[in-house]
Structure formats: C-alpha cells, structure tokens
Image: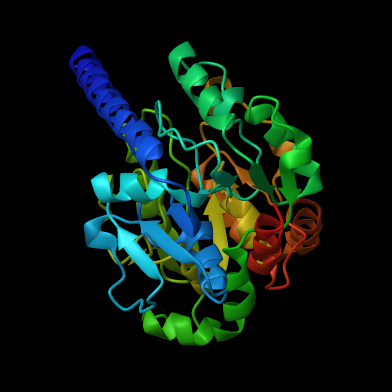
Amino acid sequence: MEFVSNCKKTIKRTAKNTLLLFFNVIINGFILFFKMQRGKVVYIPVDFSFHGNTKFLLNEWINHPGYRHIFLCDRNKIPLDYKYENVIFCPFGLLFIYHYSTAEYIIRESEFNSIGLKPRVDSKVIQLWHAAGAFKKFCLDIADRPEFLKRSRMNDIKNWDLVLCSSKELVDIYSSAFGNFDIKKIVVGGLPRNDYLYHVSSEKELIRKRYGVPADSKVIIYAPTFRDNATDFSLFIDFVTFLQERAGNKYIVAVRFHPKIADKIKIEGDVLDLNSCDAEVALVVSDILITDYSSIIFDYALLGKPMLFYAPDLDEYYDSRGFYFDYRNFVPGPIAETKEDILEQLENINAYSSTVAEFREKFNPYFDGKNSRRILEKILSM
C-alpha cells in the first residue's frame, strides 16, 4: 500500500513539474514580447483563496490610485461581493501567466512547492510569508528535504527582493531558512493580517453571535498543525471526541485544522467547525487555544488569550522536523502529553497570562492596526 502511495505521489509531482516547465517556457516568451507594466501588482496566496497577508495588503493598496491588482484565486473561491474596478481575481492559467510575466510587483506568501514560476528580472518579488514567527524548522532548514527540492527553492529565493519578518528576534532564523538570505532585505514589522485582529477584537460578541455562540459561553478552539506526509488523522479526531465528551458541558469545542488537511478530517458530534472562515475570525471567536506546534500561537498571543499545548508526539515530531528553540521552555503555556492532563490545566488556565504577554512583546510586538501601511510604504520605496 505504501509503495502504491509513493508511486502516485511521484507521478503527481513529475506531472506538476512538467506542467510548470511548460509554463516557464511561456513566461520566457511573454517576457520577450511584452514589457513590464508599471503599477501592475500580482498576488499569490498560500492556497489560492482570498485571505491571509495578501488579502489585507491588497485592502490597503487599493486606496492608492494608479495600480492594477491581479489576485490569484481558484474559481470556486473568488469573492463575489468584492467590487473594485482595479482588482481582478484570476484563476491559474494562461491569463494569469500573462499577468505574472508583465507585473511590476509580485506578492508572495510561501515557497513554491516544486520548480516554481520564474519572474522577470525587473519585477519586484516580495515574500510576506504565511506564518507569524517561527519555532519549528522550515524551508531549507528542514534536514531531510530532497536535493532537487532544495536546489529549486534556492533558485526561487534568489529572485526575492524583500522578506517580511514579525520580530527582530527571528531575523537570523529567516535568513538561515531562506538559504542565508541577505539580512538587509529582511524587513521587521507586523503582519498585514494582524491588522484585522486589532480592529475587530472589539466586535467579538457580534462575531460570536454570527456563529451561534451564546454570549456567556467559553469556546475552546483546537488548532493543531499538520504532520508532513501524514494520512492518519486519528490523533486529532480522538482528541476532539475526548474534549467533547469530558469538557463539552462547560465549554463549546471548536476546531480549526491546517488548510492542507481540513477537508480530509470529518468530526462527528456537536463541534463548532471554524475551518471555512478566515483564521483571524476563528481566533476572535475563541477564548482558549489548544494547539501543538503551530505558528498560530504568535497571532493568538496578540489577543492576550490563554493557550494550552497538547503534544503527545513531541519526541517523534522533534526528530522528524526539529525546532529552533527548546519547545518546553519556549511555548507560552502548559504542555500536556496526555488528554487527561488537559482537563487539569484548563482549571488553572489564567496562571500563564503574564507569560503570554511576554511572548507577544518579544516575538510579535507590532500590534497597532498599521502593519499593512508600514509594509506597503516599504514596498513603494524600493
């Protein structure tokens, strides 16, 4: 079974790389025949949907006249109520490749998964990155990545003109993860998407009402990270079931899974599903976060809310992925290695409020609703 699965993955990866090679040939042709168009901005979000840092940077940029915005978006994810004449939502295809080939600015949120798309030399490529902060190893710092993938990503990184980082504490980590990227090109500032958290936190009760959450209820949100190449999600399912059975009389249990696995997990019972809304909305709705190794903790700390860490596979995850910090001393909350420990920790959840505040100040200090404005000013001054 594992052999068949690996064969399917190899075939899929080969087909994808072949297609991208074809598109790169077309890009080279477009670059030869078409000039770069001043004021054209192309956005490439993580999963081709309208959310995250790209969304909130766009919302700031549209207030500046003289720019055309092309946002890569799957057909079934295009927001139908977004009405601006200078914004086009474009699915992946030849039309998007044309816009990509002629853009002055290319706004990214992640690495390309394989060989990627080569930009023109006079385009400015800005990497906003999709995660706030860092404590598990990522990109080129992950030891067991295939050499082909590492070379491909290194070639991609060479095209970047700017990288956004949430804290000066993490600059050296970002530089290392991105192949000893030039520190002078790493901009320290808050993430555009955190502006939403700043402005909307005061509307918490209105948002909770929209999702059917009573005003006097407490919401626990379980938001674990994904495991590389994982196909068995019983760890997540069993834990949600346990929470519902043992804490459901006192708390509303909500889930927010990583986008790569959200549609692969089916949760039974009376659980609040927050997978389809923006991550920022899910954070505002909830009162307590339970996670494991997810960088969502950097965003959640901005709200000053308590966090618990359910990490039954900590040693295994450390061996397969690795951390930049000592996990047990780094996370701003108690760690549980068994489900029963969580129940006890919930009783003393507010004991870590000062720890959360210190964590926020150190790793994500920019929380004033002006992050999008700051990064845009930096981009336009390049």
- The residue lying toward the viewer, choosing from 66 and 288, is 66
Q: Quick check: 152 left or right of 295?
A: left
Q: Quick check: 364 left or right of 314?
A: right
Q: Is residue 158 above or below residue 366?
A: above
Residue at 48% in and 64% down: 55
Q: Quick check: 345 left or right of 270?
A: right
Query: What is the x, y in percent for residue 192?
Result: 60, 63
Q: Quick check: 177 left or right of 325?
A: left
Q: Is residue 79 above or below residue 375?
A: below
Query: Can residue 304 be seen from the camera position used here?
Result: no
> What colour scheme governs how the chains and residues are painted in the rendered image of this protein?
rainbow
Query: What is the x, y in percent for residue 262?
Result: 33, 50
Residue at 47% in and 47% down: 224
- The residue lying toward the viewer, choosing from 328 and 75, is 75
Residue at 47% in and 62% down: 279
Query: What is the x, y in percent for residue 23?
Result: 29, 33
**In the rendered view of the protein, which quadrant contains the N terminus?**
top left
- The residue lying toward the viewer, choosing from 136 and 27, is 27
